[in-house]
Image (spheres, rainbow, N blue to C red):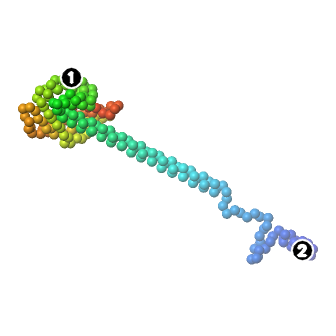
Amino acid sequence: MAEHADATTELSDATNPDINGAVVTEDEPETPAVSGPPRQRERRTALVVGMAVVTAVAAVAGWLGYRAYEAHEVQQEHELFLQTARQAALHLTSIDHTRAEEDVQRILDLATGAFHDDFQRRSGSFIEVVKTAQSRSEGSITEAGLESVHGGEAQVLVAVTVNTSNVGAEEQEPRAWRMRITVQKTEGGAKVSNVEFVP
């Protein structure tokens, strides 16, 4: 009988019945709901994915920004070519005998290369003819557009209407001219390197 009582006491010490009669072992620790290492792996994976997404977005934004900058630069260059050609066409077609030297100098200031040198050589006789004929011409741009662009050089087509008068003919019909003007980019902007009249 004593042996049976000791065995019952040992069983009572080892286990503790709950309200429903289930046996709970006091020596066994409770198992955590989520283990530590898998949760750390999930955090690390989320961090890596987040950093990859941020890097990709930054790269795309940088590329788009660079392309926008490039497009802006190209647009500005085209505007410079057009503006230079338009100005040159006006200078070439607006000559007044009362200020012929200044008008010729404006043309030379906007010219470069062989065109500059050739026009400078002929400028003296040109001024003399303009003064003798008491010539006066005034050009206005009808239309202008880029024909081609290669590197730092452009071909620009410019249509000009020119009103002319001289000592022998005060009233003349306006003339329509078309010019192909070659414009070169320079350190200070752009200059004209060639002019030819086209039908």
Which secondary structure lies at badge 2? helix
Question: Mark 2 or mark 1, which has the lower sequence index?
Answer: 2
Query: How far is disc 2 from disc 1 in space, using C-alphas?
Result: 135 Å
Q: Is residue 86 left or right of residue 74?
A: left
Most foreground residue, 39 or 125: 125
At horizontal 16% and vertical 37% (from top left) the residue drawn is: 138
Q: Is residue 65 visible?
A: yes
Label 2 or label 1, whichever lies nearer to me, is 1
**Mark 1, residue position:** 121
**In the rendered image, the vertical position of residue 28 relative to residue 125, given as above or below:** below
Quadrant occupied by the C terminus = top left
**Mark 2, residue position:** 5
Q: Position of residue 10 (x, y in %)?
A: 86, 69
Q: Position of residue 164 (x, y in %)?
A: 12, 36
Quadrant occupied by the N terminus = bottom right
Q: Position of residue 38 (x, y in %)?
A: 64, 56
**The disc labelled 2 sits on which kind of residue?**
Ala
Which secondary structure lies at badge 1? helix
At horizontal 57% and vertical 52% (from top left) the residue drawn is: 47
Residue 176 lies in quadrant: top left
**The disc labelled 1 sits on which kind of residue?**
Arg
Q: Are marks 2 and 1 in contact (CB under 8 Å)?
A: no
- Would you call the spot at circle 1 few (<14 residues within 10 Å), some (14-19), or many (20 or more)? few
Dot label at residue 26: none
